[in-house]
Image: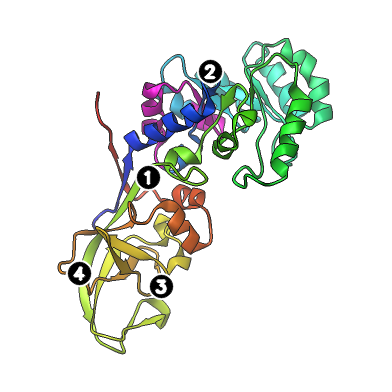
Amino acid sequence: MAQASLNIDLDAVVANWLALDARSGEATRTAAVVKADSYGLGAERVAPALYRAGARDFFVALAEEGARLRPHLGEEARIFVLGGHMAGDAALIRDAGLIPMLNSPEQVARHLEALPDATCGVQLDTGMNRLGMEAEDWEAAAPMLRDKGLALVMSHLACADEPEHEMNPRQLAEFHRMTDGIGVPRSLAATGGILLGPDYHFDLTRPGIGLYGGRPFDAALGVARLSLPVIQTRVVQPGETVGYGNTWEAERVTTIATLAAGYADGIHRVLSNVTDLYAGDIPCPLRGRVSMDLLTVDVTDLGEVPDTLDLIGPYQGVDALADLAGTIGYEILTALGPRYARRYSEQKT
């Protein structure tokens, strides 16, 4: 079976980082969030491109991700682990020179016992109630952690993609209350926080989804193009049906192309009979159910059936597809499966 291809424009990733870096301001460092394998696009290629563009701070979710990434970055790169110092992480943190963002008194104790001289950071909970130390735990831990030379103190905004949401100023005020005067670099803003303006930027911003072409950074360049190969065409007569469950019935003589991808590759089954694929700028409706490995698409109105059709690309970005699926662009990207041939384009300088 022909292999579908996921084409990743590294120049677009870099351009998006540079744009968000400019919005962060000259006094603020701009990091790059490359967790979940750079949102499914390949951290081992994306992160080095960003490093060449000037990024020096990178965020991953787990120590294992950081250890895999370390050989691909220069010595100046700092790799922060959002999940903190989990049981069994000490060797990875030490050997890869990772910076765990400690999230609880238990993690503080674990880190100070196992790696008392290793750099760390702290994540605080300012109201999201997900990860991070509560105010009383931070107050108790702060004196001994400051003596260790904290690299960063951060928190995370719950509603930054809704600029008028009352949670944003509430968390900002709480972050100030918990951290003003500590003399340690601070970070509050991911992509949405950068767009809220300078009050949220502090010393370091952490763009993630905006690097990869997703909301809420509407000015982002598209990064991913998902091209699916046509492996067969057939003519369906009026009254005949296509796919499992007979969910689509032809009303005219219809040319159906069968494509090599399905829900095993992260194409949501809810898109059945809903989305289009594209031959250049021409939409071709998905007909019938998304199956595990195959899609069936109406190509009747094309003069010639191409070798591939695009599910994600310039005429249907990740957020447009996410809207149809009732989800968000993050899920569309991170669901893209390992069977795609990931191909990278980059202008060499």
Q: Secondary structure at mark 1?
A: loop
Q: How many marks?
A: 4
Q: Are marks 2 and 1 in contact (CB under 8 Å)?
A: no
Nearer the camera: disc 3 or disc 4: 4
Residue 183, quarter of picture: top right
Please give the name of the residue rendered at 77% of the width and 32% of the height, measured from the top-left corner: 174
What residue range appears in magenta? 41-66
Residue 239 at what x, y percent from top left?
31, 89
- Mark 1 is on which residue type? Gly
- Mark 4 is on which residue type? Leu
- Disc 1 crowd, CA 10 A, few/some/many (<14, 14-19, 20+): many
- Mark 2 is on which residue type? Gly
The residue pinned by badge 2 equals 97
Mark nearer the N terminus (2 vs 4): 2
Q: Are marks 1 and 3 in contact (CB under 8 Å)?
A: no
Q: Secondary structure at mark 4?
A: loop
Q: Is 68 positioned to the left or the right of 192 in the image?
A: left
Mark nearer the N terminus (1 vs 3): 1
Q: Are marks 3 and 2 in contact (CB under 8 Å)?
A: no
Mark nearer the N terminus (2 vs 1): 2
Mark nearer the N terminus (3 vs 4): 3
Q: Is 178 positioned to the left or the right of 284 in the image?
A: right
